[in-house]
Image (spheres, helix red, strand yellow):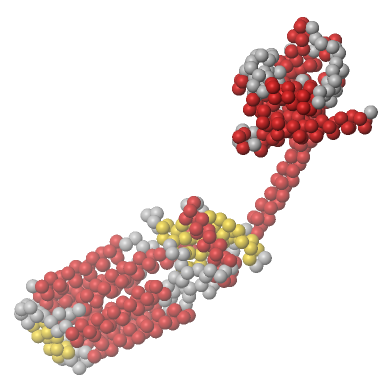
Amino acid sequence: MSITIYYSVMLALAVVNLILFVVSRAHRNNFYFGVLLIVAAVSNGGYLFMHAATSYGEALMATKVAYLGGCFLPSILLLCVLELCDINAGWFGRGMITVTSTFVYSFVLTGGYKPIFFRDIVLNRPDGGAGVTIVEGPYFFLLRLQIYLMLILVIGCCVYAFRENKTASYKNMSFLLVASVFSATSYLVGNIMLQNISVVPVIFVMDGTIILVLQHRVALYDVSSTVAESIVQQDSYGYMLLDKKRNYLGSDQVAQKFFPQVAPLHVDFPLPMDDALFIRIRTLADKLDDTLNTAVDYMEGQGREYEISVDYMLNEKGHQLGYFVEISDATEKRAEEKRLNDYNEKLRADVERETRHLREVQDQMLLGMANMIENRDNSTGGHIKRTSMGVKILVKELMVRDEWEGQFPAKYCEAMIKAAPLHDVGKIAVDDDILKKPGRFTPGEFEQMKMHAPKGAELLHSVIAGIEDPYFVQIAENMAHYHHERWNGNGYPDKLAGDQIPMEARIMAVADVYDALVSKRCYKDSMNYEDAAAIIREGMGTQFDPALADVFEACRPRLEKYYDSQIKAAEIAS
């Protein structure tokens, strides 16, 4: 009973192998693989019926069916090897292999007629032993001879292909070689060691399993054919295929023409790491794995420039089979890109130059407007220039202090420095009699003078809002409008207090008052630096932002150095 189960299981497994092969969704099923699996299933069925035979006629027929595999499977394995190793045996060679198996099987068919292959077939009752006992005849050795002859040819083909044919997969050859050696060895050892049960059905099942693995692998290599068929053959495009482990699977002649180092590569072997092309391809595959987007790079070779792109090679279910490497001649494309880039760079430089020129013109116009207004005020000669430098010195210090880190970006600081000369532009709206008065203002005159702050903001908004960056316009307006506000809320024109006062106006206030203290006016002499600094310090927290106290102290040496240089320049000029 247990032997019947054994043969039944072997038949079932052989049929399962055949079904799996038939339902596989490979690009194309290998013909010889299919024949091998059919013969294996039929032969295993023969072994089951041999054991279950109840008459001599049944046993004889079952034996002839069972020996179909023994006679033809070695030849079919050899034909598989020839195809996978891309060895062209021609119709004559394939015919001779088939004729050899047919010749041996013809002796099997003499059973029951002449005792030359089977001397006798003895029918036993299934009592724990075999259902049929085979007594070998004088020509039975032909079967063994054929098996080992085919094994020798398989080994020879694999060795030849490995040495001479770099496009043949050594992994596939190894699978077939293992199947052949396993079959021959198991047949010999099984016949010697097992008398009551045949190991041949196991051999057929194992061969079928190996064939299924090979079919799966061949499907991967068939992608080469699919790719080759789907790509319009052009001299400017080539391709390479890699498996998931980045072993080389194949390439076309165009890729080998572009990069001759591709031609000697052997299928299933890793890409060499001593060549710039293969290093670049591996790097692009790494990038693809990281980003999941097609990785592209450029590389020169043989005086040309090539685009190398790496993407995933997928099956119809979307599962990754490996990597698809496309190599295209991008010499003309890159040359055109360079021409466009050069042209765009020239345009960009021209635009930047013109923009810079326009900004310089705008800046000069703004500065000219400020100077024109200052020239109306006899009491403040050089005030615009000096306060602008004062703001610049204070801003530069704020940019490097840790406690103000991140609060003074470069764009903000540049805008404050540029806007500083415009802080008194509102004086254009003040009557000359008041603006040029050498003494103190009356309360009424002072009220008119205070209007220069909001008037300045209005003027700037109407004049420069359409030609300057809105960011700069807002800062310039704030500096003009609020530079006379006080920290304690007692300033003008809006009596803002504390953080309500924009930072740029707070900085402008310090520079404005400091200049007024240390500069000579028509109605007063200049104050020495120490006394001026004392007044500024005393005003911190009432007139000025107390957070600027340390900043002002740190800037004093630079401020005093600058004002000394202005005094010397004035003396030389006079």
In terms of depth relative to the viewer, which is nearer, 424 or 184?
424
Question: Does residue 245 show up?
Answer: yes
Q: Where 175 falls versus 382 (above or below)? A: below
The image shows residue 259, relative to residue 87, as above or below, that is: above
Q: Where does the image place residue 361, in percent across and percent down from the top left? A: 80, 31
In the picture, measured across the screen, residue 549 lies left or right of residue 292, that is right
For the point 31% across and 81% down, the residue is 181
The tally of labels here is 0
Q: Please tell me which residue lies in front, 446 or 305.
A: 446
Residue sitting at x 40%, y 64%: 220
Residue at the far right in the pictured view? 574
Residue nearest the viewer, comparing 298 with 138: 298
Task: Give coordinates of residue 164: x percent, y percent.
Answer: 48, 80
Q: Quadrant of the N terminus?
A: bottom left
Q: Is residue 65 left or right of residue 341?
A: left
Horizontally, is 499 left or right of 558 in the view?
left
In the rendered image, is residue 90 in sight? no
Judged left or right of residue 269, residue 96 is left
**Residue 74 lies in quadrant:** bottom left
Residue lying at 13% horizontally and 78% vertically, measured from the top left:
50
Which x, y percent locates residue 213? 33, 68
Q: Residue at 77% across / 32% down in the picture?
A: 559
Q: Quadrant of residue 401?
A: top right
Q: Residue furthest bottom?
A: 138
Q: Indicate the position of residue 40 as horizontal and vertical percent values.
A: 24, 74
Quadrant position of the C terminus in the picture? top right
